[in-house]
Image (tube, rainbow, N blue to C red):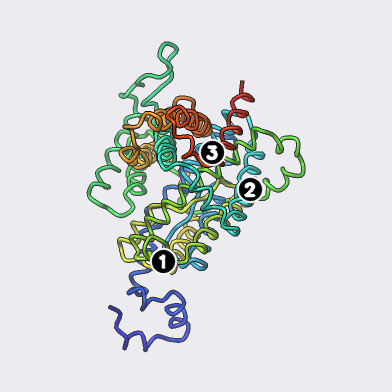
């Protein structure tokens, strides 16, 4: 309970802030909200160093992406804090940055500039379907089992990237992939980081993944695997190389934008944004006591804030953003309102001055984070109905195709093509939503185009 006499002694601005976020009604105060915001930031901070590493593989400027990552997180988290008043942090999605770099740019041969246009289109559609309440209809059309399979498949894909970045897994002419040299210094550093991060998580240490990366970087510098940086703090890197590229590319090269390839990219972005956001917001709202029955309080505002942040990230120059499940760490610390989100956003702003640390956050340092995020994402495997073959087959093909073909889009497309077929064969055609037939046609055309 909040002491009402203490609440009455608040100064004007402080009272206004507490009133706007309903501190008394939510049973919280500035101390709890601040600690919650700090905890959420520490749990999310790894993305500032992981995202530039991943998008650099697509040819983007790592320094510019560092700044774009922070700015996208600031804009999205402020929107979530002020509009929805949720204790939720927003930043570039770990699954969608991998899809952006490895599937779209490296796999499909789409330029990163055009891929940013795909992010912009998906964001604009995301906002529109949220405003017109179409989002729930589409969410309901996709069967839960395929949603779960897609999330698990993305987890496997992200983990594979981490294993490859660290050379724990390497390519093989005979077997496609095989075990790498586990005695190599850089690979040993990743193994150390993985053990350290997992140990911290098992001890429920706040910001375990972030501090695991810190420990790995320090160990790398101590052993000479990583060069010691010449500075820790510096001026904020220019975001110029990526800022506004999505808009300029749209008008400069429309022939690269209006293609079937990019249409599939936009659909995939939308698909993952849909389900990633919905699941995260439900989880955080439940833990923060923001549920009314089976519905979230201020749900439309939260969904609008999240979808608007995708548009902002495209213009700023980053892969799509999403609500972070790591926000539950802040909620566990006591965060209940959007004020904690503003604290998280402020810390992302402060972190902009630490770009020199990018030099010590190598692929071997970020690899443990990718592997651990992969582990967390496959947790829903046991919720899939494996006993029904008509569901098990498309679900399995969805999740295995992502790492096997190195493409999130291929996994989603394959699942949405096979699912209607198995359901019809099982005599359950009446259970299929008409939207699924439309998606079936779209993805059949997609595979025909790839052939």
Residue at 67%, 46% (x, y): give it: 246
Q: Position of residue 369 (x, y in %)?
A: 38, 41
Number of other residues with Cα within 10 Å of mark 2, as a class: few under 14, some 14 to 19, many 20 or more: many
Residue at 27%, 42% (x, y): give it: 198
Nearest the eye: 370 or 385: 385
The answer to which image quadrant residue 266 occupies is: top right
Report the residue marked by disc 1.
340
Which of the numbered marks, if any, corresponds to residue 436? 3
Nearest the eye: 140 or 380: 140
On screen, residue 324 versus residue 376, left or right, reads right
Q: Secondary structure at mark 2?
A: helix
Report the residue marked by disc 2.
120
Q: Secondary structure at mark 3?
A: helix
Whichever of callouts 1 and 3 sits on the residue coming sooner in the sequence is 1
Which of the numbered marks, if any, corresponds to residue 101? none
Does residue 166 appear anywhere in the picture? no
Whichever of callouts 2 and 1 sits on the residue coming sooner in the sequence is 2
Above-or-below relation of 346 to 171? below
Nearest the eye: 361 or 170: 170
In front: label 2 or label 1: 2
On screen, residue 68 versus residue 174, left or right, reads right
Number of other residues with Cα within 10 Å of mark 1, as a class: few under 14, some 14 to 19, many 20 or more: many
The C terminus, quarter of image: top right
Q: CA distance from mark 2 to mark 1?
A: 28 Å
The N terminus, quarter of image: bottom left
């Amino acid at each position: 309970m909040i002491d009402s006499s203490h609440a009455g002694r608040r100064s004007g601005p402080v009272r206004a802030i507490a009133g706007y976020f309903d501190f008394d009604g939510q049973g919280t105060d500035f101390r709890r909200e601040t600690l919650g915001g700090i905890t959420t930031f520490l749990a999310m901070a790894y993305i500032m160093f992981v995202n530039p590493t991943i998008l650099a593989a697509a040819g983007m400027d790592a320094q510019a992406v560092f700044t774009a990552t922070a700015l996208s997180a600031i804009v999205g988290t402020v929107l979530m804090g002020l509009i929805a008043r949720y204790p939720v942090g927003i930043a570039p999605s770990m699954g969608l940055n991998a899809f952006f770099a490895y599937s779209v740019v490296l796999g499909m041969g789409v330029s990163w500039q055009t891929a940013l246009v795909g992010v912009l289109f998906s964001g604009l559609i995301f906002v529109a379907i949220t405003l017109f309440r179409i989002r729930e209809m589409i969410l309901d059309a996709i069967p839960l089992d395929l949603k779960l399979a897609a999330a698990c498949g993305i987890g496997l894909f992200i983990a594979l990237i981490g294993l490859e970045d660290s050379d724990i897994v390497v390519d093989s002419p005979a077997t496609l992939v095989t075990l790498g040299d586990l005695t190599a210094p850089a690979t040993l550093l990743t193994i150390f980081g993985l053990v350290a991060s997992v140990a911290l998580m098992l001890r429920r240490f706040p910001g375990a993944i972030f501090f695991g990366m810190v420990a790995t970087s320090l160990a790398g510098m101590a052993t000479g695997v990583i060069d010691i940086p010449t500075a820790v703090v510096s001026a904020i890197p220019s975001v110029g190389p990526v800022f506004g590229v999505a808009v300029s590319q749209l008008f400069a090269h429309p022939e690269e934008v209006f293609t079937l390839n990019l249409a599939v990219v936009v659909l995939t972005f939308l698909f993952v944004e849909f389900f990633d956001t919905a699941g995260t917001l439900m989880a955080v709202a439940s833990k923060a006591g923001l549920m009314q029955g089976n519905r979230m309080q201020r749900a439309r505002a939260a969904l609008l804030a999240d979808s608007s942040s995708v548009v902002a990230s495209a213009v700023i120059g980053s892969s799509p953003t999403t609500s972070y499940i790591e926000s539950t760490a802040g909620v566990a610390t006591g965060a209940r309102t959007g004020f904690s989100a503003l604290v998280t956003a402020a810390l992302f702003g402060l972190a902009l001055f630490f770009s020199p640390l990018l030099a010590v956050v190598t692929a071997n340092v970020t690899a443990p984070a990718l592997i651990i995020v992969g582990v967390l994402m496959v947790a829903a495997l046991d919720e899939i109905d494996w006993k029904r073959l008509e569901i098990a087959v498309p679900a399995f093909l969805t999740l295995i195709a992502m790492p096997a073909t190195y493409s999130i889009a291929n996994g989603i497309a394959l699942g949405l093509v096979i699912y209607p077929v198995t359901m019809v064969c099982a005599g359950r055609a009446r259970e299929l939503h008409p939207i699924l037939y439309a998606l079936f046609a779209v993805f059949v055309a997609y595979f025909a185009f790839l052939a």
